[in-house]
Image (spheres, grey):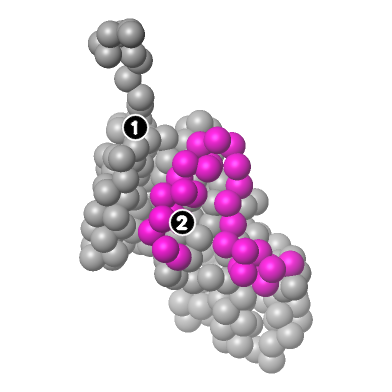
Amino acid sequence: MSDAKDSPAVRRVRVLLAEDQSMVREALATLLGLEDDIDVVAQVARGDEVVAAAREHDVDVALLDIEMPGATGIDAACALRAALPGVKVVIVTTFGRPGYLRRAMEYGADAFLVKDAPAAQLADAVRRVLRGEKVIDPTLAAAALAEGADPLTSRERDVLRAAADGAVNSEIAVTLHLSEGTVRNYLSTAIQKTGARNRSEAVRIAREKGWL
């Protein structure tokens, strides 16, 4: 019988939680902390703090909410993929929208789950992405296939986001370094693509579908 001291130590999974609602973040940390092989080693409340925290704490998996100050979870996933390609990304969100799923996977997420999923499913997703698997909520995956691709270009999304804050064309043009005519063209195209009657309705439809 070999000496236990000679057995290699099993490295526990090091997890970063990014969630702006402290009660939700703490609940997730508690649930994952009950697992024998998972340690929550870092927690942040802002999307723009994800990369620095992941690097500082040498994490294996980052669990990201979508709606966060500083940067969205999808933007944080993209930044992580560029800065620390070895870190696996799991999006965990209240907003189970097909458009979010498509964008998350395009931006480098390895898993996409809604927050009302069982805790065991979340822990299983952490383990599966480390094995190189993609994990997607099956209901949401079916909805994404039925919904079709996001028709908006990145610039059209930028202009709609700016319009959502109530900015007029001249203000959007200055913010995005575009001409007013170009802003009008992007808004017009976005309105047509969403089937909306005006910019406000285009913003609402794009948000509901998860395109913004």
Which image quadrant for residue 46?
A: bottom left
For marks 2 and 1, the one nearer the N-term is 1
Query: Between residues 131 and 196, which one lies in front from this camera angle?
Result: 131
Q: CA distance from mark 2 to mark 1?
A: 18 Å
The x, y position of residue 3, in whole percent, is 28, 8
Asked if 36 appears above or below 56 in the picture, the reply is: below
Query: Between residues 152 and 178, which one lies in front from this camera angle?
Result: 152
What residue would you read off at disc 1?
A: 12
Q: Residue at x 31, y 40 (%)?
A: 36
Q: Residue at x 35, y 24 (%)?
A: 10
What residue would you read off at disc 2?
A: 121
Query: Between residues 3 and 122, which one lies in front from this camera angle?
Result: 3
Q: Residue at x 59, y 57 (%)?
A: 136
State left or right for residue 4 relative to residue 105.
left
The x, y position of residue 176, in whole percent, is 56, 61
Asked if the residue under mark 1 is in contact with the one under mark 2, i.e. CB atoms within 8 Å, the reply is no
Crowd band around label 2 with a 10 angstrom C-alpha radius: few (<14), some (14–19), many (20+): few
Q: Which residues are magenta?
A: 117-145
The x, y position of residue 15, in whole percent, is 35, 41
Query: Helix, strand or loop at disc 2?
Result: helix
